[in-house]
Amino acid sequence: MGARLPAETRARRLFDAGHGIGEGQRLLDLLAAHPSTARFIAYKLVRYFVSDDPPQSLVDSTVQVFLATDGDIKSLLRHIFTSAEFYAHPGEKLRRPLEYLTAILRVLQPHLSVVNGRWLIWSLEQFDHLPYHWAPPDGYPQVSAAWLNTSALLARWNLAFIIPRSDERWYDGLRFDQAGIFAEARTVGEYVDLAAQQFYGVPISDADRTALIEFAAEGGGPDTPVDDDWRGWKQSSLLGLMLASPYFQWA
């Protein structure tokens, strides 16, 4: 059985009575095409991909793309990713825990393998970021402030340092090839440069490069050799430090 609603006018649109589900579908079409919907979605996309404080100019232009393409997501993302505002705001988005963990797994491939997926669930439980565990309908927070506090930051650092030690069975669910990663590096300087290029995708400052080299070489210089002994006692700490750095935490 279904209920029939009388003909009503809402937002200057006439809905004839007796059309059942078609009325609801038409209403959804009207809502989807409304400029307020375009602005809401444009704002959320720009905030997610660019900055917690979205540039108003990019939000406005994304609204126009939404209206011109009937909300085509591919067109919206292409517009955002090729905009001047996108490149003018690098490093302003903190990776949420799931994104951070996924990024670590990605950049350590193919030298890191997951042998037990349960450790993924355990890791995300530490951050309260398990998929589908956010009760309100708005989804997990997008802004950095929701994920930045003392305990959360410590947990992120611990994760970054533990994963490269997986060959030492710190994590039963992972196996990490210590000997294979950046095997072409012959010196600490080469190693840091290769890792920075793969992990960050953007240049690091001279001061940060020097600090990483000094840490990896125990106060030595960039020509300090990378050998089996170095990989055994220093490599995992260097990788952890680089994965825990702001260069990797923020995108």
Image: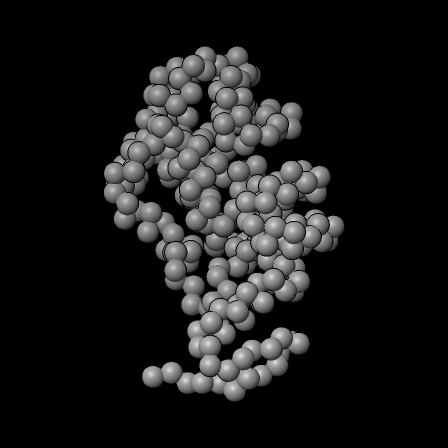
Q: In this view, does 219 lie above or below 167?
A: above
Q: Looking at the picture, how far across and down is residue 74, in whole percent? A: 55, 45
Of residues 118 and 206, the one drawn nearer to the viewer in this rendering: 118
Q: How many labels does the image show?
A: 0
Of residues 83 and 230, the one drawn nearer to the viewer in this rendering: 83
Residue 222 showing in the rendered view? yes
Q: Tell me the quarter of the picture where residue 230 sits.
A: top left
Q: Looking at the picture, how far across and down is residue 23, in whole percent? A: 50, 74
Q: Which residue is drawn at 46% across and 49% down?
A: 97
Q: Tell me the quarter of the picture where residue 13 sits.
A: bottom right
Q: Residue at x 53, y 25 (%)?
A: 197
Q: Is residue 126 above or below residue 205?
A: below
Q: Looking at the picture, how far across and down is residue 14, in whole percent? A: 60, 77
Q: Residue at x 34, y 84 (%)?
A: 1
Of residues 137 and 13, the one drawn nearer to the viewer in this rendering: 13
Of residues 190 and 81, the one drawn nearer to the viewer in this rendering: 81
Residue 52 showing in the rendered view? no
Relative placement, left or right, of 114 versus 11 is left
